[in-house]
């Protein structure tokens, strides 16, 4: 598929890396294709209060490169949403309440770095 292929400067192509992240209980899988647009470290008061940590580190992807799946049946996962500002909606697993993602408007999806599964 075209979205699974990255073009190299030399004109060659290679398969884009697919990364998976999971919530604490494993019921929600986040699948990201390709490299993140950015890596973000946020220390705003909302991130600090929701995480209980001094900052949150996330990989930021374009929305079309991220899928959310249920590990139980591969279908739609059970997520809760919390609108924390005009542009930011945070997604958590409905089962274990672990952070799954943050939607930053319609432009980006931020996935917590600590949730990525190591290959």
Image (cartoon, grey):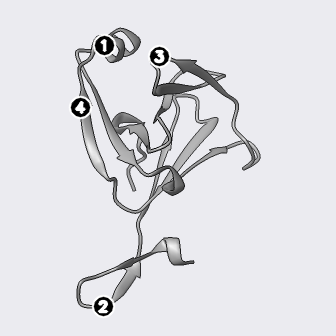
> Can you tell which of label 3 and label 1 is closer to the viewer?
3
The percent position of residue 33, horizontal first and vertical second, equals 46, 60
> Can you tell which of label 4 and label 3 is closer to the viewer?
3
Residue where numbered disc 4 is placed: 41
Observer-nearest residue: 35 or 17?
35
The image's mark for residue 11 is 2
The image's mark for residue 48 is 1
> Can you tell which of label 1 and label 2 is closer to the viewer?
2
Q: CA distance from mark 4 to mark 2?
A: 34 Å
Residue at left offset 49%, top offset 56%: 65
Left or right, 85 with respect to 52, comes to right
Residue at left offset 38%, top offset 81%: 14
Q: How many marks?
A: 4
Residue at left offset 65%, top offset 22%: 94
Residue where numbered disc 3 is placed: 84
Mark 1 burial class by Cα count in 10 Å: few <14, some 14-19, many 20+: some
Q: CA distance from mark 3 to mark 1?
A: 12 Å
Q: CA distance from mark 2 to mark 3?
A: 43 Å
Q: CA distance from mark 1 to mark 4?
A: 11 Å
The N terminus, quarter of image: bottom right
Regarding mark 3 in the picture, which secondary structure is present there? loop
Q: CA distance from mark 4 to mark 3?
A: 17 Å
Regarding mark 4 in the picture, which secondary structure is present there? strand
The C terminus, quarter of image: bottom left
Sooner in the amino-acid sequence: mark 2 or mark 3 = 2
Query: In this rendering, is residue 88 above or below 82?
Result: below
Sooner in the amino-acid sequence: mark 1 or mark 4 = 4
Sooner in the amino-acid sequence: mark 3 or mark 1 = 1
Mark 4 burial class by Cα count in 10 Å: few <14, some 14-19, many 20+: some
Sooner in the amino-acid sequence: mark 4 or mark 2 = 2
Sooner in the amino-acid sequence: mark 4 or mark 3 = 4
Callout 2 touching callout 3 (CB < 8 Å): no
């Amino acid at each position: 598929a075209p979205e699974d292929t990255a073009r190299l400067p030399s004109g060659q192509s290679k398969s884009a890396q697919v990364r998976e992240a999971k919530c604490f209980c494993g019921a929600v899988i986040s699948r990201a294709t390709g490299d993140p647009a950015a890596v973000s470290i946020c220390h705003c008061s909302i991130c600090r209060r929701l995480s209980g940590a001094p900052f949150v580190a996330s990989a930021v992807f374009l929305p079309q490169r991220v899928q959310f799946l249920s590990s139980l049946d591969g279908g739609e996962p059970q997520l809760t949403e919390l609108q924390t500002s005009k542009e930011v909606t945070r997604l958590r697993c409905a089962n274990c309440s672990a952070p799954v993602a943050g939607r930053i408007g319609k432009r980006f999806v931020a996935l917590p770095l600590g949730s990525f599964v190591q290959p």
